[in-house]
Image (spheres, helix red, strand yellow):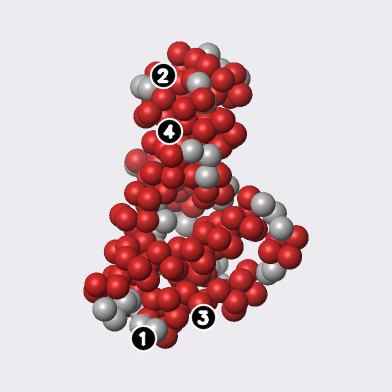
Amino acid sequence: MTEKPTPTPASGPAPASGPAAASGPASESAPASESASAPPRRRSDGTREAILVAARERFAADGYERATIRAIAKDARIDPSMVMRYYGSKEGLFAAAVSVDLRLPDLGALRREEVGEALVTHLFGLWESSDVLTAMLRVATAGPAGAERMQETFREQLLPAARQACPDPEQVPTRAALAASQLLGFALTRYVLRLPPSVALSRAEIVAWLGPTVQRYLTAPSP
């Protein structure tokens, strides 16, 4: 008599139990966790940005002295009280509208012959990716308040960067000013005046033309 084999239970994963079962597979819960950790964009963020965009346009068109909170609020399509709520005063709004962190590269960490190209590449990358620098340039040419803000950016950001590359510490202000004349002058013709030949240049061509000149201003021997 042949003995019948005992059936073997079907193989497969054991049913989950405990807290892990209640939470479901990790791959399904991860996206929910990630989305929960990302804070949603608040309505106030959009309002602030609308105010800043309107303020830059108004300050550039009218200058600081003639621009009014009421006109800026009208441009932003909000109540003037909202402007005061977020920025406190026209002076506070102006400071927020034209303040910019250039995030300049550490020129001291580069080889001396690379600093001109690196600086031009970085700055025109910022100009091409955002309208803030163009607005700041327009405001700077509209009146003394804008010019003073641009001078502050020069003192606090460009001077320290130039100091990392200049061979003579006493010449840092002069060399930085010469570099700024090249960078701002071209930016003015490309982004504000919109001269067709300047607008037509590619970013690579801008770097190729301006890089050696900025390099010379920052590192070449004194004439």
Query: Is 82 positioned to the left or the right of 195 in the image?
Result: left
Question: Are discs 3 and 1 less than 8 Å apart at CB?
Answer: no
Between the C-alphas of marks 4 and 2, the distance is 12 Å
Q: Mark on residue 199?
A: none
Quadrant (top left, top right, bottom left, bottom right) of the C terminus: bottom left
**First along the sequence among labels 2 and 3:** 2
Give the foreground label among 1 and 4: 1
The secondary element bearing badge 3 is classed as helix
Residue designated by label 4 = 94
Between the C-alphas of marks 1 and 4, the distance is 40 Å
Q: How many marks?
A: 4
As shown in the figure, which amino acid type bears the numbered disc 2? Met
Residue designated by label 1 = 221
Question: Are discs 2 and 3 less than 8 Å apart at CB?
Answer: no
Question: Are discs 3 and 4 less than 8 Å apart at CB?
Answer: no
Query: Is 56 positioned to the left or the right of 101 in the image?
Result: right
As shown in the figure, which amino acid type bears the numbered disc 1? Pro
Q: Mark on residue 212?
A: 3
Give the foreground label among 2 and 1: 1
**First along the sequence among labels 1 and 4:** 4
Q: Residue at x 46, y 21 (%)?
A: 83
Q: Residue at x 61, y 71 (%)?
A: 206
